[in-house]
Structures are given as C-alpha cells and as structure tokens.
Amino acid sequence: MDREWRKYLRELLDSVQNPDYIRPYDIPNIDLYMDQVTTFMDEHLETTKRFEDDKLLTKTMINNYTKNHLLPNPDRKKYTKEHMYLLVFIYYLKNFLSISDVKRIVEPMQEMFYGPEADFKLGDIYRRIVDIEKEVAQGLGKDVMKKFLRSRDAFPEVKGEEEREFLNIFSFIAMLSFDVYLKKAMIEKIIDELLVPAQEERKAKKETKKSAKSAKSKDETKKEAEEGTSETAE
C-alpha cells in the first residue's frame, strides 16, 4: 500500500473512531425556542454535513415530528433538555431508518422515560448511549481496516492500473454497504418482532384500563342517580 493510501486510511479511521456528536454537557440547561433549537443543532453537528447547504434540522421537521408523535409538544413554545435528547436520537436514526420505524423506537421511549414522573430519565439514557457508542466506534475502526486491506487486493488479475484502482475502491464500498444492509435488516426485524408487539400490548393494556375506569365511572353515576331517586321517593 502506497503512502497516499496509508494517509487516507488513517484519516478515514480517525473519522470513524472519533465521530462528532452532541455530548450530554453540550445541551443547555435552559429551555429553548425553536429558532434556538435549530441553531444549536446546526452548530454542534456542522461537521456531519456532506454538503454545505444540507439542512440538519428545520422548523418544518420539528413540527412534523411533533405532529406525528415522535416528539412531545413544546411547553409554551419552548423545548426542554428532554426534547433535545429525543431530537438527537431522531436525527441519527432517520439517516438509515424510515420515519415510521423511528417512531416505533422513540414513541415508547417517550411513554416510559419522558417527564418528571419517570424513574429513569432520558438524560440517563442519553449519557449511557454516548458511552456505548464510543466503545462501538473503536471496534468499528478495526473492522473498517480489515475491509480496506481486503479491498486493496480484490482484483489483482486486472492489468489496467486505473481499472484495478476503481474496482478496489468499489469492492471497499460494496463491503461497507453490505455490512450496512445486513445491520439495517436486523434492526427492522427487531422492530417488527420485538418493539411492535410490545407497543401493541401496552396499548391494549391502556385500553383495558381505560374501559374499566369508564365502566366504574358509569356504575358510580348510576348508583348516585338511584340513591337520589330513592331519597326523593321517601
């Protein structure tokens, strides 16, 4: 491997092993208006843009997330730290999952961990996930190195230097793409077979509880009416 490729590989691995992300302590302790939210995201995720005019997060996106129940409604037009944690999760997940699948992940997260009554907070989850991602990034670097080295010798029989170089790069892309394809398929399978049934079960329990409460209320109203009629008759 020539010197140029060695330099490129080091830069590539550095970008994988040291990704830019929003650290827990980066998120403000005060509630933010929508303009402040979009500005914050733009500033802290600037390096993740592929092109300069890429939009990381817009007002329309935030409104759509709220409308489709991926994000709770703001409190008097302000977004809390919990909103910000969810927005970061949504931002990363929507890069490779459909919005409907992202919703299947973050909706139960809201139900179980959003708000002051939750025992385990979204902030706790965010901090834990950031720590885990650091570990994953380090391991990923080794895997990328292995694929890269394999790709450099994928087509030794091709005589043309330009053609061989293109095929080597293509093989590297193909290996990375196949890895993403398999992992995406696994994620979708986990969502369909584990998250969706669990969510349906929670909804069924809520409906049962709601029906029981409604029936109890009706019985109490009926009983009060009967007692009132009895007193009148006396």
Image (tube, rainbow, N blue to C red):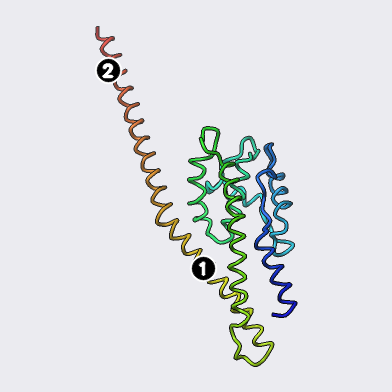
Quadrant where the image shows the N terminus:
bottom right
Quadrant where the C terminus sits is top left
Mark 2 to mark 1: distance in Å? 66 Å
Residue 91: x and y, percent? 61, 54
Residue 82, picture quadrant: top right
Of the pair 107 and 9, the residue shown nearer to us = 9
| Closer to the camera in the image, 122 or 5 | 5
Task: Say whether marks 2 and 1 touch (CB < 8 Å).
Answer: no
Callout in the foreground (2, 1) = 1
Residue designated by label 1: 181
Q: Position of residue 83 (x, y in %)?
A: 61, 43
* Residue type, numbered disc 2: Glu
Tag 1: amino acid: Tyr
Quarter residue 36 falls in: top right
- Mark 2: give few (<14), some (14-19) or many (20+) Cα within 10 Å: few
| Callout count | 2
Q: Is residue 202 above or below residue 116?
A: below
Q: Which mark is residue 114?
A: none
What residue is pinned by disc 2? Answer: 226
Residue at the image point whose x is 65% and y is 88% from the top: 163
Count neighbours of disc 1 (C-alpha within 10 A) and say few if under 14, some if 14 to 19, many if 20 or more: few
Residue drawn at the location 57% of the way across and 52% of the way down: 132
x 59%, y 54%: residue:
133
Q: How far across and how far down the image is residue 18, in percent? A: 68, 59
* Residue that protrudes farthest toward the top in the picture: 234
> Sequence-wise, which precedes: disc 2 or disc 1?
1
- Farthest residue to the bottom: give it: 159
